[in-house]
Amino acid sequence: MSTLLAPARRGAGTDRGIYTYISVFSAVLYMVLLIAPVIAGKLVQQFGLTPTELGMLFSLELGAFSLATVPAYLWLRRVNLVTASYAFTAVVIAGNIVSGFLDSFALLVAARVITSLAAGSITVIILTLSGRTSNPSRAFGIFVVFQLIMGAIILAVFPALFAGTGVGAIYWTMAALSACCLTVVRMIDGEVLRREPAAAEGGSRTKVPAGKFVTGLAAVLLFYVGLSGVWSFMAQIAGGAGIDLSTVSVVLAIATVPGIIAPLVATVLGDSPRRRIFLLIGYVGLAASVALLFGLSGLVQFAVAAMIFKFAWTFILPYLLSSLSDLGGGGHVMNTTNLMIGTGFAIGPILSGVLIESSGGFGGMLAVSLGCTLVSLGCAMAIQRKAPSA
């Protein structure tokens, strides 16, 4: 290693460096998902999108996060992760800048897909490095918490900062924040994966029961189909009850607080023999929040539903993913799980958009989301060990 690079790379690859990398990148890369209801309102105003078109945009954008997992099988162990991070971040910055200037919906879709492919590629690096820290649970907790903190900040300042602007202002803000991520890239060890022998990963693999593997993947897929379908149309559901966009933004910002508390609690509790109970509590809460959105009649009901929804969603996630990890199979199980997450995010918004447009209301969409949640609960329970280790 060159001595000229030593000061810049001091601590690179340590837990602290990886945690910093994870926190900064996860906060920025997942903004699109976390502020989807706000972006949706702006897109409808600016482009006059139908629910199906809006759902398609989010589905393609979120689906691109998932598709980035596929080529990563080829490049992840062959390139320097620092170089890859710089390259992908540059694409994210350029994509967000371009998105803000576009007035063609077709071109906007193309720009968002390319941007998300690059962001998804960085996510692959994040998830891979998380498993190589001394405390992967803490790394995953940081991954979730910093996403939610950034989402809360953006939702809180949205009414004052972006009220009189178009959706371009949001995309440009995301470009500026993405540029800030460049400052932490060198805090990781770019050669960590290339130094590992191929057999090292395979040494810890165990055979995964096919039935449980498929059931676990179904749990993750249906979980994300149900929650992303509802979350993407939160602003429209509230609007149908006469709640204005500015008020929705404030409510969703407040709802992010329990959403941040939930993964913090899950991280502190860790895995335990009570994981089955924790999952059940989370799923019941998620189902109850979706049920509250049926026949939404006012601000208080919406606020309660939104807060329970965010807490339950982020409380379930660590335990659901750890359930899949317990099945064994080394990195293949979690890589495929990540693919299911992206696929669920892709299916949920477009399915909800079609259901809303075909029925002229939100009842059918909410019913399908509630059904997905309950079936996911059943699948999650089916893959639990009888006595998970503490």
Image: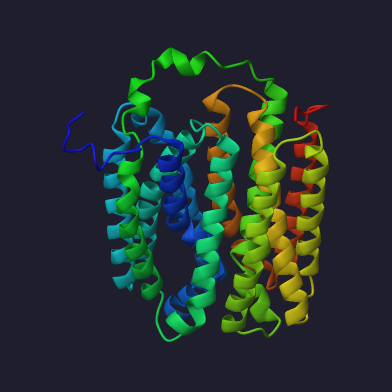
Left or right of 57: which side holds 232? right
Residue 55 visible in rendering: no
Q: Residue at x 34, y 34 (%)?
A: 189
Residue 38 or residue 350, whichever sits in front: 38
**Looking at the figure, which quarter contains the N terminus?**
top left
**Total numbered labels placed on residues in the image:** 0
Residue 204 visible in the snapshot: yes
Color encoding of the figure: rainbow
Residue 127 percent location from the top left of the image: 49, 38
- Tell me which corner region of the image, top left, top right, bottom left or bottom right, holds residue 2: top left
Residue 91 image point, x, y percent: 29, 52
Please identify the quadrant where the C terminus is shown: top right
Q: Is residue 3 left or right of residue 196?
A: left
In the image, taking residue 261 as reference, residue 120 lies left or right, namely left
Looking at the picture, tell me which residue is in the foreground, 54 or 292.
292
Instruction: Return the residue nearer the eye: 278 or 32.
Output: 278
Position of residue 143 relative to residue 54, above or below, is above
Q: Residue at horizontal 44%, vertical 44%?
A: 123
On the image, the x and y values in percent for residue 232 come to: 58, 64
Residue positioned 41% across, 16% down in the render: 198
Q: Residue at x 72, y 55 (%)?
A: 312
Is residue 247 toward the left or the right of residue 312 in the image? left
Nearest the viewer among 218 and 271 is 271
Place residue 93 in its image quadrant. Answer: bottom left
- Position of residue 187 measured from the top left corner of the image (x, y, whole percent): 34, 42
